[in-house]
Image: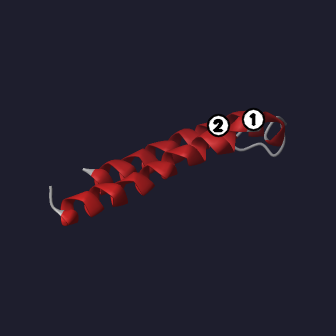
Amino acid sequence: MSDHTTSRRSGRGWWYLLLIIPFIALLWVPFYASASPSFLGFPYFYWYQLLWVVIGAVLTAIVYLATR
């Protein structure tokens, strides 16, 4: 394997750290365990988690595109 291929592979690993962000954001439940502020009738507890589903999907797409 050439040095260029090895350095390119090691550079790819940093992208996977983006996948930790949703985990950390949802790990501390007391931060978002409240009803207010509500959004379109959804309590904060629910829309915060649903927002992170979308953010997690975007981050997964970014990591996929950066590492393929």
Instruction: Residue lying at the far bottom in this picture: please name it.
Output: 4
Rounded to the nearest angstrom, the CA distance separating label 1 from label 2 is 7 Å
CB within 8 Å, label 1 to label 2: yes
Residue 12 image offset from top left, x and y in percent: 34, 55
What residue sits 68% from the left and 38% below the top? 26
The location of residue 34, given as percent across then percent down, is 84, 36
Please state the horizontal and vertical placement of residue 23, each as a whole percent of the image: 61, 39
Which three-letter amino acid code belongs to the residue tagged 1?
Phe
Q: Secondary structure at mark 2?
A: helix
- Please tell me which residue lies in front, 57 or 28: 28
Is residue 2 positioned above or below 44 on the image? below
Q: Position of residue 43 (x, y in %)?
A: 76, 36
Q: Is residue 42 visible?
A: no
Left or right of residue 51: residue 41: right
Question: Considering only vertical position in the picture, is 23 above or below 6?
Answer: above
Pointer 2 local density, CA inside 10 Å: few below 14, some 14–19, many at least 20:
some
